[in-house]
Image (cartoon, rainbow, N blue to C red):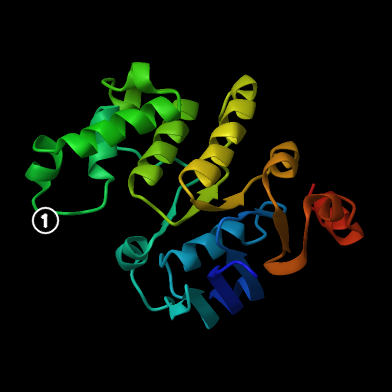
Amino acid sequence: MSAEVMLEISGVSKYFGGVIANEDISLTVSKGEIVGMIGPNGSGKSTLFGSICGYHPIDKGSIKYRGVETKKMRTAEIARLGVVRTFQQTHVYGEMDCVRNMLISRPVRSNNVIELLHRPNSDDLLRAEELLEFVGLASKRHLLAESLSFGQQKLLEFAMALMNEPEVLLLDEPTAGINPTLINGLIDRLKQANERFGVTLFVIEHNMRVMMNLANEIHVLAAGRLIASGPPKEIQNDPKVIEAYLGGH
C-alpha cells in the first residue's frame, strides 16, 4: 500500500518579470518521507518553497496539500493546514528570549497577543522546554534570541517550527551556519523529528554529505527546471546532476 501523498506539485511555473524562477515543476512528497531538493545557486529551490507556502502566487500549475488546492491560499491558512517552513536567514524574534519565541510560534488559540505571551498554559510551557532541550538549547532558554550565534538561531527556528505542530516541514538549508562539528547532531535531530514526531520533511540543502545521509529521495533543480529525481546514490552518479553542478561553479 503506497503512502499518502501530502504535497502534490503539478506543472508549477513562476516568473519574475522575464526571469524564469520555476518552469513546469512536478513532484510529490509522501507522508513520513524525508525528501531532499538540491541544485546550484539560483536554480529556483527557495522560490518553489515560497510558492508551496503561499508567499507568492504561481503563474501556472497546481499545488495541493492532501488533495486540497492551496495555490490561492495565504501563508497563515497553509500553516494552519499543517505546512510550515524555515528560512536560509533565520526568522526569530531577537528581543524575546527563547521560551517566548517558542510560545509565540505555537498554534494560535487566541487573538490576544498579551495572552499568548504572558498567560501560556502549562502544556505549552512544557512543550517549549522539551523542544528546546531536543535541539540542544535548554541551557539558553532564557537568553534573548539576538544573543545566540547564527547556528543556535537556526536551531531555535527549527524548534519554533516544531512548536507549530507541522505535518510537513520545509527546511531551507538547515545546516547553513551550523558549526561543522554539530552537523551530525542536527542530522540526527532531523531524523528524530521525522520518526518520533511523525513530521514529513522536505529539505533544501547544499551540503551533499548531509543530503546523502538524510533523504530517502532527492529532486534536483537547475535553471528553474527539475532535471532529475531519485534515491541518493542514483542522484549522486547522474551525469545531468554532475554537469549542472560543474556548470554552476
Q: Is residue 249 left or right of residue 102?
A: right
Q: Is residue 132 visible to the viewer in this orientation of the structure?
A: yes
> Where's residue 61, x and y in %?
56, 83
On screen, residue 52 above or below 233: below
User: Farthest residue in the top direction?
Assistant: 139
Q: Is residue 148 left or right of residue 17?
A: left
Q: Is residue 94 visible to the viewer in this orientation of the structure?
A: no
| Image quadrant where one finds the N terminus | bottom right
Q: Is residue 178 left or right of residue 231?
A: left
User: In which image quadrant can residue 146 be found?
Assistant: top left
User: Farthest residue in the bottom direction?
Assistant: 60
Q: Residue at x 33, y 49 (%)?
A: 164
On screen, residue 94 above or below 6: above
Type of amino acid under label 1: Asn
> Where's residue 202, x and y in %?
57, 55
Q: Residue at x 62, y 62 (%)?
A: 44
Decide which of 12, 110 is in the foreground and name it.
Answer: 110
Q: Residue at x 69, y 38 (%)?
A: 210
Q: Is residue 186 left or right of residue 146?
A: right
> Where's residue 204, x and y in %?
61, 50
From the image, tell me which residue sits under label 1.
Answer: 111
